Image (cartoon, helix red, strand yellow):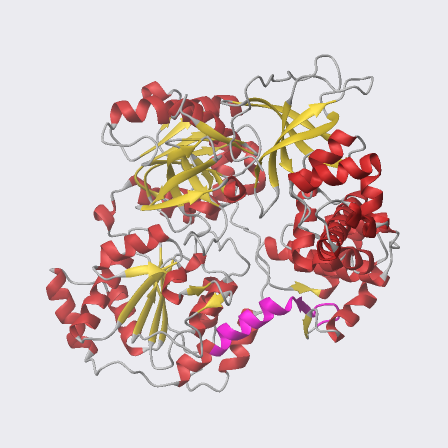
Amino acid sequence: MADSTRPPPGRTEAPPPQGGDAGALTGVVERIIFLNEENHYTIAEFRPEDEGGGKRPELVTIVGALPGVECGETLHVTGEWTRHAQHGAQFKVVAFRSELPSSVHGIRKYLGSGLVHGIGKVYANKIVDAFGTGTFRILSEESARLRDVPGIGRKRAASIKQAWDEKRAERELYIFLQTYGVTPSQCVKLVKQYGGQAKEVLSGEPYRVAREIEGIGFKTADRIAINLGFANDAPPRLDAGLIYALDVLQEEGHTACPQAELVSHAAELLVTSATLVAARVDALVESRLVVRHAGTEPGAALIQLPPLDRAERKIAEAVNRLLRVSSGLPAIRIPAALEWAEAKAGFAFHDLQRSALGNALASKLSILTGGPGTGKTTCLRALVEILKAKKARVHLAAPTGRAAQRLAATTGGFASTIHRLLKFDAASGGFTANENHPLATDFLIIDEVSMLDTRLAAALLSAVPSRAHVLLVGDSDQLPSVGAGDVLKDLVASGEARGGPAIPVTRLSVIFRQKGQSPIVTTAHAINSGDPSLPPVFSEVSALPGHGDLAFVAAVSAEDCVAKVIEICSSHLPRSCPWLHPVNDVQVLAPMHKGIAGVSNFNTQLQGALNPGKPGVRFAGGEFRSGDKIIQLRNNYDKNLFNGDIGVVTAIDAAGGGLTADFDGERVNFERGDFGDLALAYTISIHKSQGSEYPVVVIPLLKAHFMMLQRNLLYTAITRGRKKVFIVGEPAAYAMAVRNSEAKRRITHLRDKIAAATTAVPGG
């Protein structure tokens, strides 16, 4: 394989077809320029045929997932023409069909590419010289004749035959898979998972792949199954549809679903009878693919996927264990400790703050909740100082890196992310710290608990030693976690329920920050109380004052909103706040991803305004440039990066198609195959901003965002801003969000599990 991305001397670039179909090409692969062995992303030189079937003299570049393709093959490719800033026109392959070469030249190139173990260029020439266009037939059907070729003995002939058969089986598998609608990139995943059994698995159990392979969901498996002839009401299809419906509900935040609703949802999804679907629920329960919890009314039984059921059980068991086992803290006289902390702080604490500190020191498990400016930080700082004075082992953690850094800065203690605290082990796929190997701590403080989803909360609480204390801190009025569950609200509700477990809950409600005068804080609390009164409104960005914490800039349309957000970021802020870095210190938070005023378009527009003309590398949605702000979209333990981490691109590898980025002082390298886990981050969703604070926040808010306009969404967005917040949009949209307090309740079974686990706890 060639090791250079530069075209050979004399190469002529073919322009995209003019006036014809630019979506399909037929031709021969001349040279593989680049191949990622992991995902089979390929860059190749390709010589297209003309309309008469003859070869055109010019070469074109094709890019995409091309599993099993080698030099000399004839490909029929479909896709689209794109233009790379550095390398010019490229044909991006979406699907392809391959044929073995039929000419002597093509066969010689194909065998000489090294794809068959035991055949290099020398032996490829000898074999083709001996058998000509019949070479492939000889290899497949009369391999003993290979011994007629000088230098090939019995052992080498047998080795070549074995390698050829393996390669042929691989080719046939890819052809079979693509025949039934499997894309090239999905082919790679199937073969990687099942090897030579991929065809058998797909033919017999097409829905199995949706459960076992990331990136191949129910819809893809269903399309393949229908193409293979599976009946619309076949039990495997109904079972897969029910599990898919639960997966969809999980993505919406639910950990459970009433059986009647699940059956109705799945029947609509599958376009089949609800009676047939309902009959399969019992089968799934019996096979333990789902878990059923009895309800008080017919059809009200809750159905869960086993992993979520297990995670909720772990949380309930941990709550029960912590409440039952006595404290391992050194003896602390709480009133005296509070007086000491007040003297150290230089002011008297509010009664609610004293209550929170007393609960944390006296109770093994307690909860502290409250909005911005209500004194949570004061409580945490005092608690850490008391525990340090008693030489207790204190651990602090938060779901995100930025939240952990803020927690450390405000308390004076060391804080880490929860993932780092629990030490993820890539080999086992789990955490090193767990119920069998608990954390070495006396007191665990977790901040931003509203971000904790069910699975992470289960892993965290399971790793807490039985004699340790736990304080959970968060704002229960913020958006719930991105992952499934509503852990903070469920725990608060359990603690506040009459006859519930003895989990003391302290709600801080008095505003202390800046003596209650910060417009960001007071507006956030006004939103929370349902007050739709607008902040100061300005019709033009040019009218904005250089001072002030919070302002509303009116926009008459989505296009006007985008223009004014860009003007704030690129013109107003650099002029009025020269201390700000326009990329690092300013964060645009959008309610939705799509549309003119959505995350995607804002990123494109802001990149052009704030970081134009820099060298870059292409990705599916655009281009990454040096200096761009980017976000990690999923946990990557190998790179020590987690969903929501934000960094800045520091270097572009134009030749290799990769980049280097700085994430909070750590340099991380990304290959082209990693780009699916990255996105531009000039604008992120409000959900992605949870746990973070930014010097300046800009929030586009339009009636077109009506599907997402909820009080807790706007409240969360505004409370992300530390120094300045700008809302840009329609005043009516602001009022819609404030008045909509009926955020969709997440369905879980956690409260019931906690109640069942703790009924015998003294005081519970």
In this orientation, which residue lies closer to the viewer: 261 or 125?
A: 125
Q: Is residue 33 left or right of residue 225?
A: left
Residue 114 coordinates in the image, percent (x, y): 64, 43
Point 54% across, 70% down: residue: 312
Point 62% across, 54% down: residue: 214
Point 78% across, 71% down: residue: 282
Quarter occupied by residue 327: bottom left
In this orientation, which residue lies closer to the viewer: 448 or 69?
A: 69
Residue 332 coordinates in the image, percent (x, y): 20, 80
521 vs 199: above or below: above
* Tag count: 0
725 vs 242: above or below: above
Q: Is residue 130 left or right of residue 412?
A: right
Residue 351 coordinates in the image, percent (x, y): 24, 66
- Quarter placement of the C terminus: bottom left
Point 72% across, 57% down: residue: 155
In magenta stretch: residue 311: yes
Residue 4 coordinates in the image, percent (x, y): 51, 32
In this orientation, which residue lies closer to the viewer: 85 or 379?
A: 85
722 vs 285: above or below: above
Quarter occupied by residue 627: top left
Q: Is residue 69 visible?
A: no
In this orientation, which residue lies closer to the viewer: 668 or 278?
A: 668
Magenta-drawn segment: 297-317
Q: Is residue 127 visible?
A: yes
Q: Is residue 646 left or right of residue 379?
A: right
